[in-house]
Each structure stands twice: as structure tokens, then as C-alpha cells.
């Protein structure tokens, strides 16, 4: 039952399996993958859908007639192989025109061109069924602080997102936007570097309800942050519109490793959180195969991402069902009944009576300081589940 099924809602970016292994020090190592071939292979492996940048599907310089032919063929492939396109996005980072960014570039022609390219890419995504539209900052940032006014950059990003929200509404599109943070790379500093920065920005927009986040494991780890906590805050705010699953070794360059291949413990808690939260969006993988792999290695990579997710999901279920875990968790979360009642009132809202009740309550800080929390025992149980001995 680790075998991926459509109802698991696994998706891959066309750019992930088609990654040819180019890096700053070496050229491509794998041939171009035809998007239709990727759709077929991913479907056979049990994926639910694919996502794409405009130019993963339609080349940057395609004519309108070529575009329409590509869309027709791709639609047929989706239909033939029973695949969906839940998300789409824009490539605003590859072409040299975007070397200083897109929506925040200093050159007004670049900023206006970026809006035009995104409107067209939104049309393309919606035509193929996308319900979520991702904005990854790409080159929105600086190498030298002298180059841009960082306050103006925030305003420019807001102008762009507000305008594009209106564009989607005006066209009657059933579409939500998901903003994807990353702290650096390809620029040495990117604006809106973390989930927290993005969440704060969203509430300054004209349509905050339409906009959420698309956090990526590797990107938060690059900032040295706890990904599970970032996801929890996004979920609690109703803002987890999409998620980019992969893995990463510490705060380095963006490694986009196979999901669950490195940070096994935090990925266990991530999957447990996602599954228990009722999140029902795509489980999207934004990762790629090692540069050492040939095409077969790419499909091994894709199968591995999905299989590891399902293994962790099963482990999380068993962990939560383990009586020893349940008993310890109940003990840990229990406590003084009067104080529980007080705190329930705190959550329901302030009152003068409650404030004076709280002021008059007596506590025993010495006893509180002497308490043992049994987290060693609890954590060891988690480790034993993860390592497969329970
Ligand atoms: C690129 C980037 C990813 C983004 C993709 C969407 S493109 O691969 O590294 O993190 O999610 O633009
Ligand atoms: Mn990503
Ligand atoms: Mn990444
Ligand atoms: Mn990436």
C-alpha cells in the first residue's frame, strides 16, 4: 500500500523530471524530455497530475499557431493518460531580459513585459485546468544593495500581484495565487525570503483572500528555519494553497533532492501534520534526479518521492495509533483542571472578570519547575516508529 494512487494527489512540475542536470559548473547530462512523454510516464507511476511554467510547455518564441497546436496535443495527452494540471506558473527568470528580476526589476519595460507574460501564462494555465497559480520570485532581488530601493521593490511586487488578481477576477477565472518564498539563489538576496515574510505581505494586498503561500522544504531549510512550523502557521491561517516537497542538506544552495531523502525526522512530522490537518491540495514534488542519472534514474527519483511520502504517511498513522504514544501525549497535555478552564476562557475572549480571576489565581512555580515532561521517552517512540522497530 505504499504504491502511489491518483487519490494521493501527487504532482510533479514538468521542469522537475525534465531537469537535464545543468549546473553552474557543468553542462546538460540528459536529453530533452518531451512533456507528453513525462505525462505518460508519471501517470504510469501513479501520479495525479503535472504542473508547468509557460515555457516548459510552449517555447518562449513560439508563434500563436504553434502555441495552439502544443496546447491541443497536450490536452489530448492529459486526457489519454488521465492526468490533471492543478497548478501553473510563469518563467520570469530564464530569459536574459529578466536578469535584474521581473516585477521588481528597475527597468520599467521589463516590469511591464513581466505583467504581459504572466497574463498570457495565466490564460494558458487556466485553459489547461489550473486552479492554483504560483509566483516564485526567481530573480526578484539584488546582488548589490545599491541597485534598488527595497521599499519601492515591495510596492512594485504589490502592484503586480494586485493587478494580476484583478486580471483573474475580470476574466472570471477560478484561480488562487500562491506565493513561493526563497532567501537567495539565483540572486544573492531575494525579496520576501521566508514563509513569514510572504504571509505578512499577503495581508497588505487588495484581495488577501485570493492569495496564499507555496512553501518549499529546501527554501526554508536554506534559511535555517523549521519547515514544519512554517507550514503549521500557513495552515492555521488558511493560507497553505500549495506545497513544494523535496529535501535539502542544511542551509546551502538549493539542492531540490528527492523528497524524504535527507531530513527524515522533520519530513515524518511534516507528513503527519499535512495528513492530520485536512490539507487536501496537491502533494507536489519540486525536485530533480541527481546529475549522475540517466532517464531511468529520473523515473526512479519520481517513484521514490511518492513512495517515501506514502511510507511516512503510514508511519505517522501507526505513531498516532500507538497506545504508548497516545498515553504519553495525554499525560503531557493534561494538567490542572482549573487552569485549563481559565485558558479556555482566555481563548474565547477577554473580560474584566477573567482578568481579575487570573490576577487572583495562585500558582506553584517551584512545582512547575520540578516537573519532568517525558519528552525523551516520547521522542524515542517517534524515532523507533521512524526507524521501523515499532
Ligand atoms: C524553479 C524553482 C522552484 C519553483 C519553480 C516554480 S521553478 O525550479 O527552483 O523552487 O518552485 O517557479
Ligand atoms: Mn519550488
Ligand atoms: Mn528549491
Ligand atoms: Mn528549485
Image (cartoon, rainbow, N blue to C red):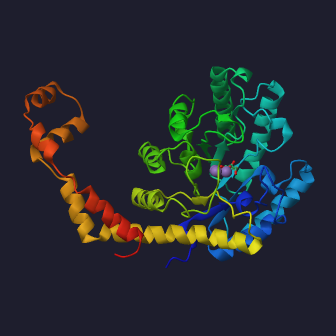
**On screen, 22 above or below 186?**
below
Position of residue 182 in the picture relative to residue 357 (left or right): right
Which residue, as the protein is rendered here, is positioned at the far front?
25
Position of residue 167 in the picture relative to residue 216 (left or right): right
- Whether residue 195 appears in this view of the structure is yes
Q: Quadrant of residue 96?
A: top right
Residue 51 image point, x, y percent: 68, 57
Residue drawn at the location 15% of the way across and 48% of the way down: 371
Q: Quadrant of residue 363?
A: top left
Residue 222 image point, x, y percent: 57, 45
Q: How many marks?
A: 0
Position of residue 376 in the picture relative to residue 201 (left or right): left
Residue 161 image point, x, y percent: 65, 34
Which residue, as the protein is rendered here, is positioned at the far bottom?
1
- Whether residue 80 appears in this view of the structure is no
Residue drawn at the location 48% of the way across and 59% of the way down: 267
Residue 120 image point, x, y percent: 78, 44
**On screen, 83 above or below 124?**
below
Residue drawn at the location 62% of the way across and 74% of the way down: 46
- Which of the pair 307/34 is nearer the observer? 307
Q: Quadrant of residue 223?
A: top right
Residue drawn at the location 31% of the way across and 66% of the way down: 381
- Which of the pair 55/218 is nearer the observer? 218
Q: Quadrant of the C terminus?
A: bottom left
Amino acid at each position: 500500500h505504499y504504491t502511489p494512487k491518483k487519490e494521493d494527489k501527487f504532482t510533479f512540475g514538468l521542469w522537475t523530471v525534465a531537469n537535464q542536470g545543468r549546473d553552474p559548473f557543468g553542462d546538460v547530462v540528459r536529453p530533452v524530455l518531451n512533456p507528453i512523454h513525462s505525462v505518460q510516464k508519471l501517470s504510469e507511476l501513479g501520479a495525479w497530475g503535472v504542473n508547468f511554467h509557460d515555457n516548459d510547455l510552449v517555447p518562449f518564441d513560439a508563434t500563436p499557431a504553434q502555441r495552439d497546436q502544443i496546447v491541443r496535443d497536450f490536452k489530448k495527452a492529459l486526457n489519454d493518460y488521465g492526468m490533471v494540471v492543478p497548478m501553473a506558473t510563469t518563467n520570469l527568470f530564464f530569459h536574459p531580459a529578466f536578469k535584474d528580476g521581473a516585477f521588481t526589476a528597475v527597468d520599467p519595460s521589463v516590469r511591464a513585459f513581466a505583467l504581459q507574460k504572466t497574463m498570457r501564462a495565466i490564460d494558458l494555465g487556466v485553459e489547461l485546468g489550473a486552479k492554483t497559480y504560483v509566483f516564485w520570485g526567481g530573480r526578484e532581488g539584488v546582488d548589490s544593495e545599491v541597485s534598488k530601493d527595497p521599499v519601492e521593490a515591495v510596492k512594485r511586487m504589490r502592484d503586480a500581484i494586485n493587478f494580476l488578481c484583478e486580471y483573474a477576477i475580470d476574466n472570471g477565472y477560478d484561480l488562487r495565487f500562491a506565493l513561493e518564498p526563497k532567501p537567495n539563489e539565483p540572486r544573492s538576496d531575494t525579496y520576501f525570503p521566508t514563509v513569514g515574510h510572504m504571509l505578512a505581505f499577503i495581508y497588505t494586498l487588495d484581495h488577501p483572500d485570493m492569495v496564499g503561500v507555496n512553501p518549499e522544504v529546501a527554501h526554508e531549510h536554506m534559511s535555517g528555519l523549521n519547515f514544519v512550523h512554517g507550514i503549521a502557521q500557513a495552515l492555521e491561517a488558511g493560507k497553505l494553497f500549495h506545497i513544494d516537497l523535496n529535501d535539502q542538506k542544511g542551509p546551502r544552495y538549493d539542492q531540490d533532492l528527492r523528497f524524504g531523502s535527507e531530513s527524515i525526522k522533520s519530513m515524518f512530522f511534516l507528513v503527519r501534520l499535512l495528513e492530520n490537518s485536512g490539507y487536501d491540495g496537491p502533494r507536489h514534488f519540486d525536485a530533480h534526479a541527481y546529475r549522475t542519472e540517466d532517464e531511468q534514474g529520473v523515473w526512479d527519483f519520481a517513484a521514490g518521492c511518492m513512495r517515501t511520502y506514502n511510507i511516512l504517511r503510514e508511519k505517522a498513522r501507526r505513531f498516532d495509533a500507538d497506545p504508548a504514544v497516545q498515553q504519553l501525549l495525554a499525560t503531557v497535555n493534561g494538567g490542572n483542571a482549573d487552569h485549563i478552564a481559565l485558558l479556555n476562557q482566555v481563548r474565547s475572549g477577554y473580560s474584566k472578570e477573567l482578568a481579575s480571576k487570573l490576577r487572583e489565581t495562585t500558582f506553584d512555580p517551584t512545582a512547575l519547575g520540578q516537573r519532568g515532561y517525558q519528552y525523551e521517552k516520547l521522542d524515542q517512540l517517534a524515532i523507533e516508529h521512524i526507524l521501523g522497530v515499532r
